[in-house]
Image: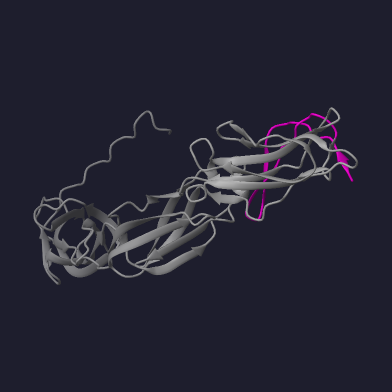
Amino acid sequence: MQNKRMIFGGLVVGLFSLGFFVNVRIAEAEVNTDRLRLDSYSSPILDGERQKTFKVDGFASYTGVSWDTVRIDARWAHSGRTDSSPVWTKFNGGFSHVFPVGDAQRCGLVVFEAHGTVRGLKYESNSEWAWVDCQAPRVLIGKPVEGQMVKAGSNVELELRIEDDLLAAKRWSFGLGGYDLKIDLDGQPVFSGKLNVASPVLQKWNVLVKEPGRRGIRVKIQDKVMKSDEKTVWINVDGTAPQVRVISPTGGQAVTIPSGAMPVVTVEVEATDPGEISSGIDKVEFYLNGQGVAAARTPSEDNKYVGRFGVSRQGAHAIRVKALDKVGNAAEITVNINVVFAGSTAPAGKPPKPSRTLPR
C-alpha cells in the first residue's frame, strides 16, 4: 500500500480522451488509498437534462478495526455547493450513495471524495469527477450574412462561434474530442469532423459555391451527450456576367474634334446585370489603347454610363469598355474609332504647381 499527502490547492483540470481529469487534494492527514477508495467511472460526462441522479460506489477496509465514520462528499465547482452522503459508523466494506444532479445548483464539474476516521486519524480517498452537461451547445454564424451576394465558383468564408458550458470551463481547449461539427451546402456534405482545436470557440472554413442561385449553408454542432444545435444561412450566388454595349461612338466611326476644342472623346454605353440572381452593376471602366482612362459608377440615366477622356493624337484608337457587377463578374467590348482634329485643338494648359506642403 502506498501512502500519500494530498494538499488542497484548488481544482486542477486536465483532459483525457472524453473529458477532464481532476485531482482535488485536501490536507487533513496521511492517506492510504487502499484503505479508503472510490470506484472509477468509465463515462464521466453526464446529460443533466435526462439523468437526474448519479451513483457513487466505494470501499473501506482497515485491518483489525472498523472505521469510526465514512461519508462521501460531492463538491460542485460552479455553484460552490457541497452535497454529502449519510455518515456510516463502525463500518467496513463497500458503500454507495445516489447524488442528485442536473438542477440549477448541480451542473458542470463535480468532484467526489470519501472521507473517514479511524482512531482519531482522518483519511480521504482518491478523487473522482464527473461533468454534468445541462446546456445544449449553440452555434452562431457570423459570416456569411443572410442574403449575402457571392460570385459563383468562389470560396465563401464561413465563420462560426460555438457556445457551450463545457467550453466556458477552465482549460476546455483540451476537451474537444466529444464535439462533432457538420457543414453542408444544399444538403451536400462539405465537412464532417471535430472542432479545430487551434481556435475551438471560433471556427473558420471556406465553402466552395459553384452553382448560381439561392443556396443554403447549414451548420450542426453536437456535444458528447448528443445535445445539438444547428443554423442555416441563405446566400445569393450570382453566376451571370453583365451585358454591355457601346451606344456611341459606333465601331469604325470618325470622331471629329472641332478647331479650338479640347481633344476629348465621350463614350456612352449601356450596361445591365441579367439573371435570376443579380448583384447589380458596380462600375464601368473605359480603356484607350489598353490604358485605363475613366470609370463610371453612377448611370446618367437608366442603365446608361458615360466616360470622357482625352486623346493626344489623331488617327485610329481602340476603346475597350468593361462592365463589372458587385461580385466581380465582368464583360467587355471593344470598338475601334478614327479621331480627326479639324484644326488646332485647345491647349490642355499648364499643370498646377505642386503644393508647398509636398516634398521637393
Where does the image place residue 145, in percent across and percent down from the top left?
33, 51
Q: Would you identify the image quadrant in which residue 339 lies?
A: bottom left
Where does the image place residue 323, in percent across and percent down from the top left?
23, 62
Above or below for 305 versus 192: above
Q: Is residue 198 visible?
A: no
213 lies left or right of 162 = left
Which quadrant does the C terminus fall into?
top left
**Residue at (15% x, 48% y) in the render:** 346
Farthest-out residue, front = 90
166 lies left or right of 250 = right
Q: Would you identify the image quadrant in which residue 359 lies?
A: top left
**Residue at (88% x, 44% y) in the render:** 2
Q: Is residue 26 magenta?
A: yes
**Residue at (51% x, 59% y) in the render:** 180
Magenta range is 1-30
Q: Is residue 118 visible?
A: yes
Where does the image place residue 22, in percent across and percent down from the top left?
69, 43
Q: Report the predominant secondary structure element of the magenta stretch.
A: loop
